[in-house]
Each structure stands twice: as structure tokens, then as C-alpha cells.
Image (cartoon, rainbow, N blue to C red):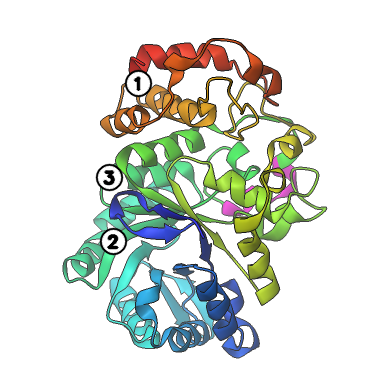
Amino acid sequence: MKYNILGRTGLCVSEIGLGCEGFSEDGGARTASLIELAHKNGVNYIDLYSSSPVIRSSLGEALCGRRKDFILQAHLCTIWRNGQYKATRNLPEVEEGFADLLERLHTDYIDVGMIHYVDSPKEWERIEKGGVLAYALKLKAEGKIKFIGVSSHNPLAALKAVESGAIDVLMFSVNPCYDLLPAGEDCEDLWREESYQNELTNMDPDRERLYETCAKLGVGITVMKAFGGGDLLSENSPAGKPLTVAQCIAYALTRPAVATVLAGAHSVEELQASLDYETASREERDYAAAFRAFPRINWTGHCMYCGHCAPCTKGIDIATVTKFLNLARAQGALPETVREHYAALEKTAKDCIACGACETRCPFGVGIVSNMKEAVKIFGR
């Protein structure tokens, strides 16, 4: 298992995390086997969004004796009413839900307290001014949560939260189809067939700005819906053809600030398919050829960090240099963290001899040589 640092939290997290979708099935009977398989394979990050007593209790039982082996991301603002999940901003209900969460998980703290389902800028303002954020900050001060997060499907709402400086972690829906669509307050638009009827070109600029802002500010991203709820893996994929599990995971992990992909699993076999990413070949992880073949979708001129440009004749990690260049472009300046990470590269854009071999291999027609020249101007080497 490979591990990444989750932004400014400093937490070292497995690049494959575990979602809790399958925990409620069969009365929670699958939870123990899913946790056992995750633990055996080095998974140390779990997302628990559900307020279902069955899910919370079954996870608490499965974690007995090994709570410290896992980093828990669990959601505030979710409660259980009349046999079903309910999102709430009512403070007494939020407090009740959190107390129930700790009790059922048999723990006295949550690593990342995730403010649940913030899908409009106005909703974030409500969080800031209505007492929920203040409550989360109080829990953090008391050590009951270590870090504060927000879950969202809307890049404009997420940007508001990230730029506030109040949150440390963003849980966001990241995949190559959703990334094409403009911001909206109805998350169901992300998987509606009609959203993909017209030709779509390159990543939505608000989504790109969100990822780059997270990287600049040190807000780590944990990925939900990497498989689009399974849609991207099927013949009904909004891309017009199915992707593989490994391709979806590889795409998400190459986005700026992403530290872990939360693999939802309804069975041991589904979880194992995600874990197999760790031993997948470069060819199995390669998403570029599949993207290029998508009908109605065009990424021409846009670097997807896919690595097809490699190997560079001078040993430059072109995808990484381009990622740092795009981060600097997005800020209109040179952030210190980006400058230092760039300086640590063994080979930089200054080593480019403009041979153009990389451009002949790029599936998306990116002007790599001109990017290298711009990087030298910005970074000085």
C-alpha cells in the first residue's frame, strides 16, 4: 500500500481508503470481513457518512481492539429519524448525532469531523453563521475531533469552505466525467444522462481551480464517487464506454491535493478489486487511451498527468513539472510550497532540450516544450 500525507493535517493515509456503503447489508454482517480485508492490505482510512445505527454499531464492533490502526473520517450533521437518514443543521440534533456516533464506535474522538453535504455557497454561509462551524471548532478544541472537513459535490461551495481557512480536509466527488460539468446545486445532475448529451471539452475551470486551491492552502482531498456510484464501470457510463476500477483510481490520485480514494464496497470481492490497484501494471492504470476514445468528450490541449509523455530523454518527470506549473499559473504567483516541491525535483524544466519526443507521445496534443520554457521562466530552473 502506498501512503500520502493528507494536506496540512500531517496524517499519513493509505491511497486506497474504505467507504461504508456495504456495511448496512445483511444487518452489518459484512462489516467485519470488509474491515479485516482492509486492515490486512494496509488500508488505514475509513469514511463513515451514515447515521444508521446498524452501520455505526457494526463498525464500532469491528474496530474493537484496533481503533488506533485506522484514521476515521466521520460526518457531523447526520441523524437517524423514523428508520432513515436525515441531514440536519439543527444544533441540538447535530450534537445528539455526534454523541451517538462516539458511543456506537466505542471511541472518544474522530480524526476528521466532516461537515456533511455542503452543496451550495449559501449552505456554507449557513454553516459559518448558524452555529455548526462554531460547534465543530469547539469539538476540535476539546480534542473530540482532530481536524475539520467538509463534504461537497459543488466546486463553488467547496471553494468557499476551503478559502475560509476553517477546514483541513475536503471530501469531493472526483472522476473524469463529473470533472467536465459546471458547478450546480443538484448533485443528481452529475449522473443524469442528459448532462452528457452535448460535446464536453476539458475540465470545468471551477473544478480545476478547486483542486489547485486545495493544493495551495494545504487542504487534503479525500475522494468520493471515483466510480460514479458504479456508473463509470458499466456500459451505461456517461462517458459512452466503461472504464476500469484501476483507471478511475489512477485518474483521481493524479489530481492536485488528492491523498486517498474512498472505495465503496458492497462485498469483499468489490473491495479486493480496488485493492488490486496496488499491484496493477502501468498499462492497467493507464486512462489516457480510454479518455481519448470517449465520444462527445474532448481533452485536446489539456494535460491529464497521465504520464504518456514519458520517458523524457533527459529524465524530467514531465507530468509533475506540468502539475507544479499549473498550480503556479492558477495562483498568478509562485506559492512557497510549490516552489520548494519543484526545487526538490532531481531534473527540472531547465534540463529540457526541446527534442519534442514527449509531444509525439501525448494523447491530448499538449504543447509540452512550450510548457517547459514557461516553467523555467516561473521557477528559474
Image position of 300 with respect to 159: above or below? above
- The quadrant in which residue 129 appears is bottom left
| 304 sits left or right of 170 in the view | right
Residue position for label 2: 147
Identity, as a three-letter code, of the amino acid under mark 1 = Gly
Q: Disc 3 and disc 2: Cα gap in Å?
A: 15 Å
Q: Earlier in the sequence, mark 1 or mark 2?
A: 2
Q: Is residue 242 on the magenta stretch? A: no
Tag 3 secondary structure: loop
Q: Which sits in the foreground, 216 or 159? A: 216
Q: Which sits in the foreground, 366 or 102? A: 366
Query: Mark number for residue 54?
Result: none
Contact flag, marks 1 and 3 (Cβ < 8 Å): no
Residue 167 in view here: no
Q: Residue furthest left?
A: 141
Magenta stretch, main secondary structure class: helix
Tag 2 secondary structure: strand
Write the residue at 32% across / 44% down: 218
Write the residue at 68% across / 49% down: 281
Query: Mark number for residue 164?
Result: 3
Residue position for label 1: 332
